[in-house]
Each structure stands twice: as structure tokens, then as C-alpha cells.
Amino acid sequence: MEKLAIPAYPPELLEKKGARNSQAMVDFRGYTVESFLRAYRDCGPIFKTKVNGLDEVVFGGLQANEEAWRRPDEWSYSEAVRVFREELSSLHLTQLDREPHRRKRRLLNKAFKTSSIMASLPQISEQIRLGLKRINGIEVELHEALMDVYTRAQSVSSIKETLSDHMVRKMVDFEEGFIGALFLNDQERALVYSRSKYTNLKSEVLSYLHGIVRKRLTGETADDLLDAIIHQKTSSSIEPLSEEELIYDAYLLLIAGTGNTSKTLCYCLYELANNPDWTAKLIEEIGQFDASSMARGMSNFPLLKATLMEAERLFPAAPVLPRVPFGDLEFLGHKLTPKMHCLHLVSLMHFDDSVYEDPFLFKPQRWIDNEYPKLAHGTFGGGSHVCLGMNVARIQLPITLGYLLSNYNFSITKEPKKEHYAFPSEVDSMTVRMNVILSSK
Ligand code: HEM
């Protein structure tokens, strides 16, 4: 049967963020969330338009999330996020497809499942507590300060390694340099990635990781998650992780995602500063925080959980993801072809009032009063490529907020500024930069 044409939405009806105030802190590729919501209501879950001058097939909504996440093999992650392959390696997880992706996820699962991470809860929480203590009384740019804290927390759990302050700094700078340029256009990105400051950082960090991997492969053990993935028993049909692959897996264990976790916390703190009544109730719930009480989950901390869910909803680190069909594909009743550039608005539903009442307002209480459909929450993506570090982030975030609000007062000393990366054909992302001073209670 002949397929219906994908509805076209006039690009001039999409509003550039700067041209019109949006109620949302995030935007979609530099356009207001509200204008994409209008397009979705006019056209339905899939439409064609131009975004930043490029032809895109755009899709979003519960049904689109369901279809996209249910059939990951229909999409070429290798094409859509090729920058990970070009800049790190063809062995890096993010851009693998189909069977190679399934093999790698299976082998890494041991290090990223909740039970493995929770086994190091005392060490992780102690590092986070100490990390906050280290910045007590000092004005810091919170995003990078937290990346430092999270890298150290990973170094006592995932890869047990005594990192010098110098190496932690290099890891944070490398991650910031890598992720920051990820969203530039091809020429600008090539320029940034070829600068000697960045290439030196990258080679120093990767050779440091290689050194760790080599030690572990030649008999040294540390009883950590890197050892666990190296020495796991697998069926003979699964190729074990090679030395070269393990360098990039070590990057995942120690460094990847620290920026996303920290930006979620920064945004959350900014909202808490603006919502003193809720913050007072939250501080009361947290009391004298002791992370060991999280060992049985978050049931003792309903307000803390709700606060972080609301931050995840309103400030998804990657609100729009690029997608390219693997082959000819029937999707939402339409035919897509391999050359088509698509944008999956994974977080569109976060702002839809048919799901969330007053969707643009920070109202954590909603998570206590309501149950929301899982398909409405796109912060970590979905399906077999769902964020590998989701459990890491969801353990680190409540520990950080718990200790921070329990032990410190905080003041924001430099107005939050959104650092924005929204360029064609790459993952969308933005960061809240703000200076903060903690002072002991
Ligand atoms: C709040 C923090 C975080 C957020 C919001 C976030 C968000 C995301 C999103 C939206 C994706 C894309 C999923 C897709 O393509 O469908 C993703 C993938 C990924 N994330 Fe995260 N992330 C966070 C923290 C982390 C951490 C701590 C790690 C540490 C390893 C991590 C590692 C990864 C990896 C490796 C992938 C690719 C997974 C795959 O393709 O199989 N993320 N993340």
C-alpha cells in the first residue's frame, strides 16, 4: 500500500530561542521547545522541516519514543554519532550497532548494573562527601568542580587507582574539551580537535588509561569493576574485550558522563535556590545525611527522589538526539530511507501538558502525587542504547545533594549562564555555568 507523505512543517514557524522568550531552560537545537510542541500538535508525531538550514525528519511523543526504543536495530548509531568513532575509536561503545553493540553492552553490564555500583556505596559516598568538603568556603565554578568530584568517586569504585590532582584535572579538561567540541559543526570541530593543547591532553589521558589496562592484563588486581569486566566468564561465542577496547572501556568507567551528571546537579541547585519553601522541606527530610541509608534504595527520601526527577525532566542533558535509519524503514506509518537525517525529540513529552500539568514549572511534588508513563521520560534515552551510566548518575546525584544540603549552606555568586551547544547534526546539549560558595552549617 502507498505510504502517506510525511507532513511538512514550515520552518519559519519554528522560533529561534533568542527571538522569543521560552519558559524552558533547555531548547531544541536553538529553537524554543514551545514551537516544536506546536509543530507536534499540528502535524502529529513525525514531520519534515528545516532545522538550522538542514532538512530533518523530526519525531517525538510517546508513540515515537516507543517505536524508536523498541527497534534500535533499525537505526544506525554509527552514522548518527560518528564523531565518537572518529575522535575516540571504532571500538567505542556509543557508535556501535547491532551485534557488536549487543556484545559490548553484555560485557560492560557487569560494571554498570546497580548491584555492582552499590557494592562500593561507602567509598563513592565518602569521596563525594570529601569532594564537597574540599570546596567548602571557596568560590568555584560548580560544573567543573563536580566533574572533579565525580572522577574521584569513580576512582575509588569503578577503577581503583590513586589519581594525582594533576591527572584528575587533565581528565576533566579532556572530557570538557571532547564533549564541548562534539556539538560544533564539522570544520570548527576539526579545528578544536587538532589544537595541540587538546591533542596533548587526549594522548596523556588515553596513555594513562592504557597503562592501567596493561597492568591489569599482566596480573595486577584491584578488586574493582575494571577487573570484573576483564575476568568475567562468558560463553565461548563472545569475544573477550581486547587490550585496545579496554582503554575506551576504562574511559567509560572513569571519566564518561561526569559532565552530564554535574550539569543535572547544577541545574537542580539553581532551581532549589529559587524555591526556598520546597528546599526547606527537602532539608528537613534529608536531616543529618548518611548515604549508607540509601543502600535499600530511595524509599526513605521521597522528596530527594522527586527533586532529582524534576531536575532530570526540566533539564535533560541531551534533549534531542540525531538519528539515521539503518536501511529502509517503516516508522510511524511512514517510509524512511538511509540517507535521511532525523531528530528524535526524546524530551518533547517532558513539556507536554497532557502528561505534566504546568510542564514548565519546577514542581517536584508532582512526582509524589502522580505516576507518569516511562515513555514520557527521555532524559537517558531508551531501548538497548539507553544511557549506560544511568545507574551511576542516579546514585551519585542523591548522594551529592544529600551531603550538600545536609552539611552546607550554598549561595550562587555568579548568575547562572547557559553555555549552549546546538549545531546541526550532532547531539544537542547545554550546561549551566554558575559560581557557588558552600559554607559549613
Ligand atoms: C545525568 C547524567 C546523564 C545523562 C542525562 C545521560 C544521558 C544520556 C543520553 C540521552 C544518552 C543517549 C541514549 C541514546 O542514544 O538513546 C546516553 C548514552 C550514553 N551514556 Fe549517558 N548520561 C548521563 C550520565 C552518564 C554517565 C555517568 C556515564 C558513564 C559511563 C554515561 C555513559 C553513556 C554511554 C556510554 C552512552 C551510550 C550508550 C550506548 O550507546 O549503548 N552517561 N546518555
Image (tube, grey):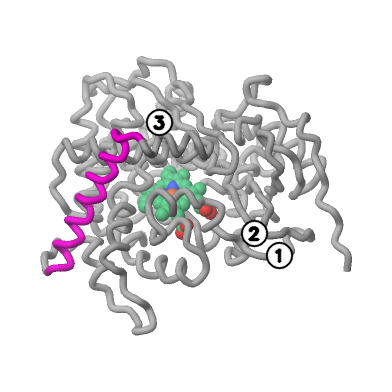
- Determine the CA span between mark 2 and mark 3: 35 Å
Q: Which residue is mark 1?
A: 328
Residue 390 seen in render = no
Locate residue 173 relative to residue 79 in the image: left or right.
left
Taking the spot 20% from the left edge, 42% from the top edge, the residue there is 127
What x and y, as percent, mark residue 247? 28, 57
Q: Residue furthest right?
A: 2
The C terminus appears in which quarter of the rendering?
Answer: top left
Mark 2 and 1 residues: CB-CB less than 8 Å, in contact?
yes
**Mark 1: amino acid:** Asp
Examine the residues drawn in magenta and state their main secondary structure. helix
Crowdedness of circle 2 by 10 Å Cα count: few (<14), some, many (20+)?
many
Q: Nearer the viewer, mark 3 or mark 1?
A: 1
* Residue 251: in magenta span: no
Q: What residue did someone put label 2 on?
A: 325
User: Which residue is painted at 30% across and 40% down in the image?
Assistant: 199
Q: Which residue is mark 3?
A: 266
Residues in magenta, as a range:
195-218
